[in-house]
Amino acid sequence: MTDYPVYDVLIVGSGAAGLSLALRLAQQSAVRIGMLSKFSLKECNSYYAQGGISAVIDRDDSLEAHISDTLEAGVGLCDPEIVTLTVSQGKECIDWLLDQGVPFTREEPENDATPLHLTKEGGHTHRRVVHAADQTGKALCNSLQESVLKTDNIDLFEYHSAVDLITTHKLGERGQRVVGAYVFDAKTNRVGRVGAKILVLATGGASKVYLYTSNPDTATGDGIALAWRAGCRVANMEFMQFHPTCLYHPDAYSFLISETLRGEGGKLVLPDGSPFMHRFDRRAELAPRDIVARAIDYEIKKRGIDCVYLDISHKPADFIQSHFPNIHSRCLELNIDITREPIPVVPAAHYICGGVMTDRDARTDLAGLYAIGEVACTGLHGANRMASNSLLECLVFAKQAAIDILEELPNLAAPSELPAWDESKVNNSDEEVVVAHNWDELRRFMWDYVGIVRTDKRLQRARHRVNLLKREITEYYGNFKVTSDLLELRNLVIVAELIIRSATLRKESRGLHHTLDYPVSQPDSPAKPTILTPEVG
């Protein structure tokens, strides 16, 4: 058993949302902050984000246009007030990042006096995506991480995961409030307790629930499962965004081909070189991601081909190398010269638009618990996320949460001593193959039955299998000491169940949820979110 300090704020997760929040809170030197990073500090979804951050900066653009584009991409399920709140803070958030030293690409390279270079991505009617070449997430995270490591009132714990939230309800006390968490140290394989006045989930997404994904191994839905077990509602879990263009190559694990290639003129083509996107949408390559992903999936299945191709070789070589240096160099390592030949691509699970329900200040249903970033369902994305709105959401709701938390902290007392983690009745596992087998089975049937295109029959099969797996995993968890893989599997099976339940409830096709049994959208006005409420005993 390991004991940790009691913190004013414990942040679970260390991506763009968690880092931004920590730095904003740390401006108040009296606030003591703990931050958990499941792996190393650099291993998070945000770090791998290539595209950029959408913000209204160009004089020909407008807040109204950005709002309209976001609402259109969200297919009737966005919360207009949240969209307005988020979009209106875009430029302010970019200015804050510039103050943090993030090296965004300028109109003239190596000249910080020139305006920021803006690119265009799917769903946007204007150039409004601020970026750092094609490695925006890396540039952003490196700058914020450097600041966090220099800040005295932030304690960082790498290779630490939250096992479960500790609430007053679980302790048999009055009310329902979070007071801390049990934490697993992957380096020592020990579980400890961390008390906190306020706890923030910034754990990222859940795309590892699918066999093929653009995400790193961290994206196992931990925060969604933690909040669900603690009694929080989740919403819109059926809307999993499949990025249209991941590199198709046996040696390129989860390598994303940024949407900015299409924004800068890249064309999707079949193996014979013929374009096809014009047959699916008037915006062709710049249609929202759900449309492009379904179009590629349709062509692959119809023609029995392994992939389609993304071709930008008609652009000058120096343009390609300067705008997409990371993609260019990675493809060259695999003997693909994107200045001369097209890139083989396929769709892969990328971003979940649903998550833990929050309000405009990032509060969840559970007092003292906040959620920011991809783990949260704020109402911004609706049924389909528009490109580059995700990092903007991280920044805006980190700011919203920071303001609310700093107002709340003076009124809160430190939690009393928390009970120790009890593992007296469990043993070390001698069957780790069970975890590996269940992990593989779960991700395979989610890809096969709950993928880009769904049917009632496929969802029924998936629900039957997830129920069997959930019982087996729960029994295993109750008998053996926890490991990192077991914790992730325990969380993933909950996320899978929530996605399947949500998809089963939506009797229409809308945005990212496309079902052959209900191929059109219901004419409800407004459209209704899918909300699931846990039973907490």
Image (cartoon, grey):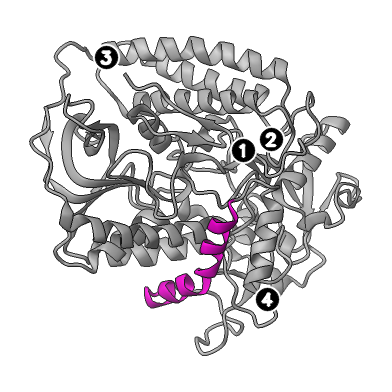
Q: Nearer the viewer, mark 3 or mark 1?
A: 1
For marks 3 and 1, the one nearer the N-term is: 1
Say whether residue 32 is visible: no
Callout 3–callout 2 Cβ contact below 8 Å? no
For marks 2 and 1, the one nearer the N-term is: 1
Callout 3–callout 4 Cβ contact below 8 Å? no
Does 6 lie within the magenta span?
no
Residue receiving disc 4: 61
Residue receiving disc 3: 480
The percent coordinates of residue 176 (x first, y second) are 26, 33
The percent coordinates of residue 455 (x first, y second) are 73, 22
**Whole-Å distance between the Cαs marked 4 and 1?**
29 Å
**Whole-Å distance between the Cαs marked 3 and 2?**
37 Å
Q: Amino acid at mark 3?
A: Phe
100 horizontally vs 255: left or right: left
Q: Amino acid at mark 2?
A: His
For marks 3 and 2, the one nearer the N-term is: 3
* Disc 3, SS: loop
